Image (tube, rainbow, N blue to C red):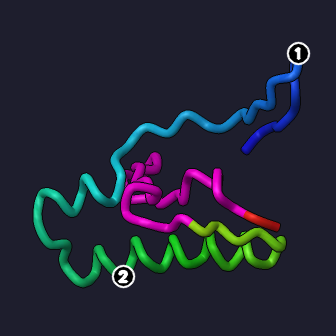
Amino acid sequence: MYDVGEAEGTAYLVMEHIEGETLADRLSRGRADVAEAVAVLTQAADVLVEAHRLGVLHRDLKPENVMITRDQSGRDHVKVVDFGLAIL
């Protein structure tokens, strides 16, 4: 999240636009191999550890809220999205 605020009585969030696919989309094409699954889940866990360190509990973790993008070297990079139900 880049920013949060309120304008004319309406709350807003400014977030990154992410190119890629959800984990749900990836899994709809078939089972992931063990190495891919470990890489994706490890990165997602790292995000949650950092969120918890900051006092944020996601509360809606599911394959639809895990985005898989490609970094510049072509490797998968994972982002956990939709903190709309998160609590501090």
Q: Is residue 63 left or right of residue 27?
A: right
Residue 82, above or below 39: above
Name the residue rendered at 64%, 57% in the picture.
85
Q: Which mark sits nearer the N-terminus, 2 or 1?
A: 1
User: Would you identify the image quadrant in which residue 23 lies?
Assistant: bottom left
Q: Is residue 67 left or right of residue 81?
A: left
Q: Is residue 44 left or right of residue 2?
A: left
User: Which amino acid, by three-letter code, is at mark 2?
Assistant: Val
Residue 58, above or below 71: below
Q: Please give the label number shown on residue 38.
A: 2
Magenta-drawn stretch contains 76: yes
Residue at disc 1, secondary structure: loop
Name the residue rendered at 55%, 53% in the picture.
81
> Dividing the image into 4 quarters, which one contains the N terminus?
top right
Residue range in magenta is 60-86
User: Which amino acid, by three-letter code, is at mark 1?
Assistant: Glu
Label 1 sits on residue: 8
Q: Position of residue 56 (x, y in %)?
A: 76, 69
Q: Position of residue 53 (x, y in %)?
A: 80, 78
User: Would you identify the image quadrant in which residue 64 lies?
Assistant: bottom left
Q: Position of residue 14 (x, y in %)?
A: 72, 33
- Residue placed most toward the observer, 88 or 29: 88
Residue 26, above or below 43: above
Which is in the foreground here, disc 2 or disc 1? 1
Magenta-drawn stretch contains 78: yes
Residue at disc 2, secondary structure: helix
Q: Is residue 61 left or right of residue 55?
A: left
**Residue furthest to the left:** 30
Q: Please give the label number shown on residue 21.
A: none
